[in-house]
Every structure is written in C-alpha cells, then in structure tokens.
Image (tube, rainbow, N blue to C red):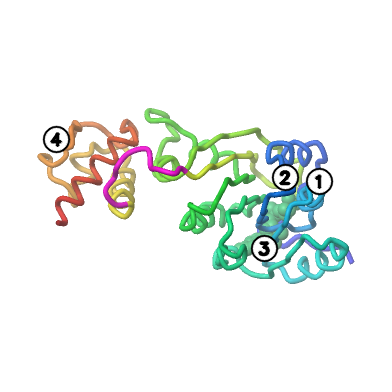
Amino acid sequence: MKHRARKRFGQNFLHDQQVIDRIVACISPQAKDLLVEIGPGQAALTRPLLKSGAELHLIEIDRDLVSQLQKQLSDHSNINIHCCDALRANLPEITGNRPFRLIGNLPYNISTPLIFHVLQWHEMVVDMHFMLQKEVVDRMAASPGSRTYGRLSVMTQFRCNVTPLFDVQPESFSPVPRVCSSIVRLQPLKEPPADAGSFENLERVVSAAFSQRRKTLRNSLRDHLTVDQILASGIDPGQRAEQLSLSQFAALARSLSYDAS
Ligand code: SAM
C-alpha cells in the first residue's frame, strides 16, 4: 500500500537519484563501518548504504514505515531496525558501545536537538552526514562577523568540524518542502578548540550574549559578568556577541567558572 507522507514526522521523501548518489559518495561507506541512519523513511539512502556491506542500524519513529522496511529489507542480514524516537534513543546501547557513523535526512523540527542529543556520546561518533534546512547549515558553519553567526554556530563549532557539502533543491523531495536543504558533514573534535572550563558555562554565556544580539556585551551579559570581569577576559565590553571568536567565548565562560568557585 502506498504510504501517505505524515507532516508531523517531517516526511519529505528524497526521490532524486543524482542527489542520493552524491550523498552516498560523500559518505563513502565501507564494509567495516557501523552505520546508524535516523529516519530511513522509504529507504532512499538505506538501499545504497546497504550495498557497502556495512552493518546498518535504522531508527524510525513511524510504525507503518518500520513494517514496510521490515518486509522490503528482509533479505539483508546486516540490518537492524529500531522503531523508536531518535531523540530518546540510547545509541551506545544500540551499537554495543562501538564507534559509529551517523546519517540522516532529518525532519527539520528535530534536527538541532537531535545533533546535541547525539553529541553526548561524541567520543563514539566517527562522523555525521545530515540533510538539514540550508539555513541551519549556514548558521552552523558561519564565522564571526557574519549575519548568520550565532549560538548554533558557536555551540556546534565547539564540538565539531563543520563542512557544508552541497545544496539540495525542494523538487528533489516528495512532497516538495517549502525550503532549500543542504548536506553537511560534522566531525566531532577530540579536543575543544579553546578551554571554556565547563560546557555548561559556555552554553550560559553564549545564550545570554546572543539573546540580545544587537546589544553590547556590557548589557547582554549584565546578569552574568561585570564589566571588570569582561575586561579581565581580555574582551572589550563594547563589542557585540556576533563579533566574538570561539576562544573569546571560552574566555568569558572561564570567567563565569571563577565567579562560581
Ligand atoms: N530518509 C528518508 C529519505 O531521505 O527519503 C526519509 C526522510 S524524511 C525527511 C524524515 C524521516 O524521519 C521520516 O521517515 C520520519 O518518519 C522519520 N522521523 C521523524 N521524526 C523522527 C524521530 N523523532 N525519530 C526517528 N525518526 C523520525
């Protein structure tokens, strides 16, 4: 029976073979890999991934699609299908604590929480290839001084190398989404690019600084750091968040740590 795309699960199925081939070429799956695909849907990416001979775990929330996948892929022994919400999935349990590569044409509404959910196991994540809204990829990859540089840029670049790969037009999907998409490669970093003391303090300072991005740090960080503390971090309190580098955010986060100790 033909599946009717469900909006609540962000179902836009990829049907453009050229795009599918290009994504799989970027991933370059190998037989030795352990792959986890989030939201396999109707197996557009799954089938070519299976050809590599890699062990593949699929995480799909839609029960109807899971039963279709079980029927259609029953010939393959290197596949495991998990019917659950990826936002709650315990990936080390699924993969038996082995390093894995993550792939997904993600539903737009869960993409950023999902990436940060997965990054709690960053030492096990070899790399991630995702199809996201183009605007989200632009924000993840943005540099200081650009209009799109913000909280998502800093928090992602603190954890990962971000490589935008290519854009995908809405017509490559069915149903056709309203927005343009992009493929991105995220590679978790072994060490953060600067010492922020604690990741929680970095999160606090970055979200306060960007919550009022037009304001100077003197004002946006008022509830967290004094002007003297900002100066002692080597930063001009008259600057705005969008001008600060990763290491400057790390310096502000360290000042918060001293403050708390
Ligand atoms: N991979 C397929 C493709 O490229 O055509 C489908 C992509 S579609 C944009 C997103 C897929 O993620 C759907 O199959 C949807 O049911 C599934 N999905 C949505 N929310 C999910 C969640 N929280 N956990 C796991 N899968 C989810």
User: Is disc 3 placed on a helix, strand or loop?
Assistant: strand
Residue occupied by mark 4: 231
Stretch in magenta: 189-198
**Quarter of the rendered structure image containing ligand 1:** bottom right
Considering every residue shown, the one lying at the far front of the view is 32
User: Is disc 2 placed on a helix, strand or loop?
Assistant: loop
Quick check: 86 left or right of 168? left
At a point 74% along the width and 41% down the height, the residue shown is 24
Was residue 197 drawn as part of the magenta stretch in this picture?
yes
User: Is disc 1 placed on a helix, strand or loop?
Assistant: loop
At a point 73% along the width and 71% down the height, the residue shown is 63
- The picture places residue 65, in percent across and down from the top left corner, at 77, 65
Mark 1, mark 4: which one is toward the viewer?
4
Whichever of labels 2 and 4 marks the residue nearer the N terminus, that label is 2
Residue occupied by mark 3: 59
Whichever of labels 2 and 1 marks the residue nearer the N terminus, that label is 1
Mark 3, mark 2: which one is toward the viewer?
2
Quick check: 168 left or right of 114? right
**Marks 2 and 4, Cα distance to the nearest angstrom?**
50 Å
Res. 15 mark: 1
Mark 1 Cα-neighbour bin, 10 Å: few <14, some 14–19, many ≥20: some
Mark 1, mark 3: which one is toward the viewer?
3
Quadrant that contains the C terminus: bottom left
**Marks 2 and 1, Cα distance to the nearest angstrom?**
23 Å
Quadrant that contains the N terminus: bottom right
Res. 30 mark: 2
Mark 4 Cα-neighbour bin, 10 Å: few <14, some 14–19, many ≥20: some
User: Is disc 4 placed on a helix, strand or loop?
Assistant: helix
Q: Is mark 1 within 8 Å of ligand 1?
A: yes
Quick check: 177 left or right of 15? left
**Marks 1 and 4, Cα distance to the nearest angstrom?**
54 Å
